[in-house]
Image (spheres, helix red, strand yellow):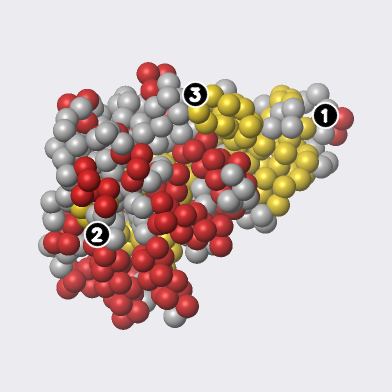
Amino acid sequence: MSHVPIALINARLVDPAAGSETKGGVLVVDGMIAAVGASVTRDQIGSGATIVDCGGDVVSPGLIDMRVFVGEPGAEFRETIATASAAAAAGGVTTIIALPDTHPPIDDPAVVDFLRRRARDTARVRVLPSAALTKGLGGKEIAEYGLLKEAGAIAFTDGFHSIRNSQVMRRAMTYARDFDALVMHYAEDADLAGSGVMNAGELASRLGLGGIPVEAEAVTLDRDMRLVNMIRGRYHAALISTRMSLDVIARARAAGLPVTCGASINHLTLNENDIGHYRTFFKLAPPLRHEDDRRAMVAALADGLLDVIVSDHNPLDVDNKRLPFGEADNGAIGLETMLAAGLRLVHSGDVSLPRLLAAMTINPARILGLPQGRLEKGAPADLIRFDPDEPFVVDAAALHSRSKNTPFEDARLQGRVKLTLVAGDTVHA
């Protein structure tokens, strides 16, 4: 915790919870927000605090990323907690939820404890582990949710794996409900997806690549909604990418089901045409979709149907990406560019700034039951300062992640983070 109070003054305060923008400042004392609003000025604070004049920059809660591969244990050559957290801090992300797709997977309380200790010793930001839904991520036998939650797991997911067996999924949801645990599922019918490597359609045919139909996502998602209706446990669709999936979520919400959903920043700002001449940094799971689907996703974000934006940070080395498109692994890094890429939607007039930030702060905080993501007195002082209009060109070599597989390489973005605080401590400036 910081012992010297910090006052961020002359700021454009964006409160995602209230959906408001005001002028004022934030006073941080002992890692907590002590005051916020127009009353926080240089004259009111006095000489006992460190003064940071924001010059009209935005000050908001730090971002919460619900889907991050951190590499430890077992894949440190791709990423480490230290490098992932450095990238997060540079991108304004103050809390990351680590995926369980590690070696060994996070399906044992000892592995949860290992990750928490490593994060305590090496991370700049908060790192919270999610644990596996099924043992070994195999989709056959459910994990010990009670013990994993007691050890510190904040939610349960099989990460990049979708559970094919409906009976296993039913048992997982039932067991999770009994522990009031959140299920975060990646919905994809593996049989429908088959050997596809990009979105099914005209472009895939012209490129000579196998396609993954939108129904592969919607069919599994619809099954899950029917199970939620049966069991009434908390469910979060980790990654959706199509208009058809949005329709499934809308029907579930209308029926009063406890369902939320998220999408990666890639599916909100990119489409299948960005693949171009077989550019493997744009090979993702789910695949980049048609522009009509992207526009539908953006509209859902603006309307509040889409709850959460994630980076879907998945670092991969050159040996797994510099391959023919059909052979390359799925995934891209995104911690450091998520906010700036999302600001494209603000600058285009499609989404308001408070709505964009809500999907990256207060919404994930509420879903996960976290005290962060709020710009109010008594909340943890996880804060960021950024200029939403400052332009820059993405230099992959300068990114903090150990792997450099960004789909935004050489992209012209706006919105550079100038200051990141975690519990009042400066972790990026």
Residue 348 is situated, as x and y percent measured from the top left of the image, at 59, 44
**Dots 1 and 3: beta carbons under 8 Å?**
no
Q: Tell me the residue at 20%/52% (across/down).
A: 211
Question: How far apart are labels 2 and 1 at the CA level?
Answer: 57 Å
> Which mark lies nearer to you, 1 or 3?
3
Q: Earlier in the sequence, mark 2 or mark 1?
A: 1
Q: Which mark is residue 42?
A: 1
> Which mark lies nearer to you, 2 or 1?
2
| Quadrant where the image shows the N terminus | top right
Question: How far apart are labels 2 and 3 at the CA level?
Answer: 34 Å
Q: Tell me the residue at 87%/30% (across/down).
A: 43
Q: Residues within 10 Å of mark 3 (few under 14, many from 20)?
A: few
Residue 95 is situated, as x and y percent measured from the top left of the image, at 46, 41
Does residue 11 sit above or below 253 in this rendering? above
> Which mark lies nearer to you, 2 or 3?
2
The quadrant holding residue 315 is: top left
The quadrant holding residue 54 is: top right
Q: Which residue is mark 2?
A: 213
Q: Tell me the residue at 67%/45% (across/down).
A: 14
**Mark 3 residue element:** strand
Q: Which residue is mark 3?
A: 393
Q: Earlier in the sequence, mark 2 or mark 3?
A: 2
Q: Earlier in the sequence, mark 1 or mark 3?
A: 1
Question: How far apart are labels 1 and 3 at the CA level?
Answer: 34 Å
Q: Which mark is residue 57?
A: none
